[in-house]
Image: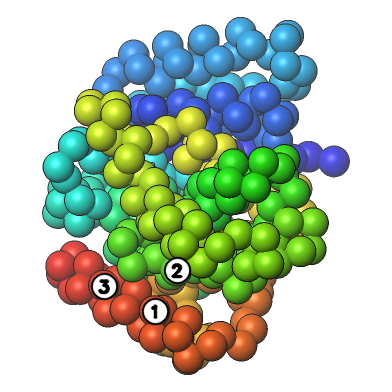
Amino acid sequence: MPKGKLTIVGSGAVGTSAAHWAVSRNIADEIVLVDVIEGIPQGKALDISQSAPLCGFTGKIVGTCSYEDTRESNVVIITAGLARKPGMSRDDLLQKNVEIVKKVTENIVKFSPDTIIIVVTNPIDAMVYTVFKVSGFPKNRVVGMAGVLDSSRYRTFLAQALGVAPKDVTALVMGIHGDNMLPLTRLASVAGIPVEDLLSKKELEEIVHRTKFGGGEIVEHLKTGSAFTTPGLCAIEMAQSILLDEKRVLPCAAYLEGEFGISGVFLGVPVVLGRKGVERIVEFPLTQEERDALSKSVEAVKKQVEATGL
Ligand code: A3D
């Protein structure tokens, strides 16, 4: 059965990582890596293609600066734009990245009017809105990556504190990709056992705090950019669920129209991802405290969206 065509726009750190994971997981028949800098996507695609005999990739990988090559993509991941440096917030990237993301979206829509777009460029909750507005796509075909990464960070820190295998920890982070995100302690569990029964309140508070600032912690170490290996994998986790119609339940920035009592913004919520993109938002009851925390996320996202001028 054909798996489809995947385009990754932006061949920097995250785009290259995404291409690497897509090849190692063999999730597409064709992978197209795009950038504005001549030579970069071509060289990187060639390098990655030479891993095929070792990892079992059976498709084709193309590096290009021309959107002609992206024609009829089934899924497009947008990573084009500036990344954070120490001392910068995600909001500092907004104005420059809005311009980049607008241009990229116009080109994608021109050659792949039926595609599903996964947005990674920061500040993600505003960039995914930008793609939604500029593309004119229905809400199921535009989605943002952040919750998969924040939840994976949360699960990692919980597993480390508990001394257990990370894959046995299940946890959900909702809301904005920023300081006001909402790691849900109430729902985190290890093999079905609530973490609240295994860790103290203080330990859990420290883990929640580290999760919220997990991206910044990496930026402080790297100094020249932000996290890329796991962000690339998270985008591929989403692309794979769409291309292979896996119907995974993943936390993603999805457009809300009344779910969780919120409308008119993209916000991190659990969704079912399949061949049609965001096939369903999984709504469940929140406590008053969680609803209040989510409201703070909504206010922060609205401010970002206002700043885009869209
Ligand atoms: P970087 O390594 O600088 O790569 C960005 C690439 O985009 C460069 O190769 C640029 O040449 C390219 N580019 C710039 N303008 C265009 C354009 N118009 N068309 C095509 N390509 C273009 O950055 P990165 O890969 O580390 O990060 C990329 C973006 O992802 C940044 O905005 C990061 O903040 C964001 N990011 C988001 C997350 C989330 O969890 C949401 C995680 C990590 C990074």
Q: CA distance from mark 1 to mark 3?
A: 11 Å
Q: Which residue is mark 3?
A: 300
Q: For the view shown, which residue lies furthest in the right direction? A: 1
Q: Which quarter of the image is occupied by the N terminus?
A: top right
Three-letter code, disc 2: Leu
Q: CA distance from mark 3 to mark 2?
A: 13 Å
Q: Residues within 10 Å of mark 3 (few under 14, many from 20)?
A: some
Q: Which residue is mark 1?
A: 293
Q: Residues within 10 Å of mark 1 (few under 14, many from 20)?
A: some
- Picture colour scheme: rainbow
Residue 38 at least partly seen = yes
User: Which quadrant of the structure image shows residue 61?
Assistant: top right
Q: CA distance from mark 1 to mark 2?
A: 7 Å
123 and 182: which one is in front? 182
| Left or right: 136 as drawn, with respect to 238 | left
The circle on residue 141 is: none
Reply above or below: 98 against 83. below
Q: Residue at x 73, y 56 (%)?
A: 190
Q: Residue at x 29, y 29 (%)?
A: 221
Give yes or no for contact between labels 1 and 2 (Cβ–Cβ under 8 Å): yes
| Left or right: 90 as drawn, with respect to 72 | left
Mark 3 / mark 2, whichever is N-terminal: 2
Mark 1 / mark 2, whichever is N-terminal: 2
Three-letter code, disc 3: Ala
Q: Which residue is mark 2?
A: 182
Where residue 17 sits in the image (x, y, percent)? 49, 28
Q: Secondary structure at mark 2?
A: strand
